[in-house]
Image (cartoon, rainbow, N blue to C red):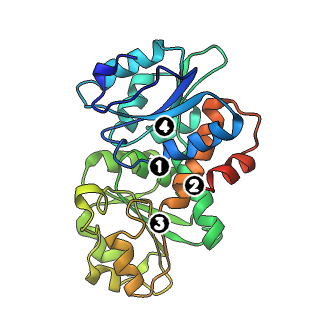
Amino acid sequence: MNLSLIENEIDISHLDKYAAIIGENPSNGARSPKLWNKVFENDGLPYSMVPLDVTKDNIIELLNDLSMDKDFIGGAIAVPFKETIFKWLGENITPEAKKIGSVNCLYRDNKGKLKGTNTDGEASLVTFESKFGTLKSKFIMILGAGGAAKAVASYFSANADSTIVISRSQEGRKFAEKINVNWGNWDQIDKIIDTVDVVINCTSVGFGNQEMQSPLSETQLKKLKKSTIVFDIIYQPLKTKLLEISDKNNLPTLNGLEMNLEQAVLAYKYAVKSNKSLRDIREIMSKI
């Protein structure tokens, strides 16, 4: 790999193989390397997952380089490149990822070709249902229309009674039409907020330099039914401003920590071709 294409410093010279999490700045606390490396260590494999910070100018060149590097086994995709890498992969994507329009996982097929899939949606649904049960008869409001939002919307809408995607972009509207759900812009939230059963934040509001912000105001959150569940897929911080206000108003909440774990379990199985079951991988990663 051409190390000049990445913004952070890494050393992979001592590794037989390596995985990577690719994003704008995953070196700033991404959890996936800790999760994957725990399983590598357990398996006694001289592998490691490393964070690759890359700019929009260098992402395509980096992908071309990684695809030619046989020591690279795959890994995870972080913001903001889930849709960029989906387009770069062309036809080399799973049916699930094709439906969603973004990838968060890279792996090599049996011929060694780099392929992409999306584990965000499945992970979000498993995590939610394990805590709150079935989505039947539920009205879901999803905030955002980026890569993660599309994955979540695809899986939740297939199991819920009704779903609406809220976004500021027409791209969100097109995606909502594609998966046959409702769409609304941010101005329409106040008109429906007292009728929704589940709110899912799939925006980046609450993370990074927006950590002190919430996608919904306290006034809006007070309009929710007391039974409405607020799910924020962000896991850094564990309690976002959105969840903090929701807790204050005694609403049931869920953060993105378990979803992050679940998608890592699924992605590891794709990339490493481990003989371990998903349950075994999950058990090892859960110790982090």
Where does the image place residue 241, in percent across and percent down from the top left? 32, 72
Q: Residue drawn at (58%, 34%), measured in percent from left and top?
A: 95
Who is closer to the viewer here, 139 or 33? 33
Quickly name the residue at label 2: 288
Quickly name the residue at label 4: 76
> Which comes sooner in the sequence, label 3 or label 1?
1
Real-space Cα separation, disc 3 to disc 1, in angstroms: 14 Å
Q: Is residue 240 visible?
A: yes
For this view, does 127 lie left or right of residue 55?
right
Quickly name the residue at label 3: 255
Q: Secondary structure at mark 4?
A: strand
Callout 3 crowding tier (Cα within 10 Å): few <14, some 14–19, many ≥20? many
Tell whether label 1 touches label 4 (CB within 8 Å): no
Callout 4 crowding tier (Cα within 10 Å): few <14, some 14–19, many ≥20? many
> Which comes sooner in the sequence, label 2 or label 3?
3
Of the residues tagged 4 and 2, which is closer to the observer?
2
Quickly name the residue at label 1: 31
Of the residues tagged 2 and 1, which is closer to the observer?
2
Callout 2 crowding tier (Cα within 10 Å): few <14, some 14–19, many ≥20? few
Tell whether label 1 touches label 2 (CB within 8 Å): yes
Q: Secondary structure at mark 2?
A: loop
Three-letter code for the amino acid on which mark 1 is drawn: Arg
Of the residues tagged 2 and 3, which is closer to the observer?
2
Real-space Cα separation, disc 4 to disc 2, in angstroms: 18 Å
Where does the image place residue 276, in percent across and percent down from the top left? 75, 39
| 143 lies above or below 62 | below
Tally of numbered discs: 4
Tell whether label 2 touches label 4 (CB within 8 Å): no
Three-letter code for the amino acid on which mark 4 is drawn: Ala
Who is closer to the viewer here, 46 or 166? 46
Where does the image place residue 60, in percent across and percent down from the top left? 33, 22
> Which comes sooner in the sequence, label 4 or label 2?
4
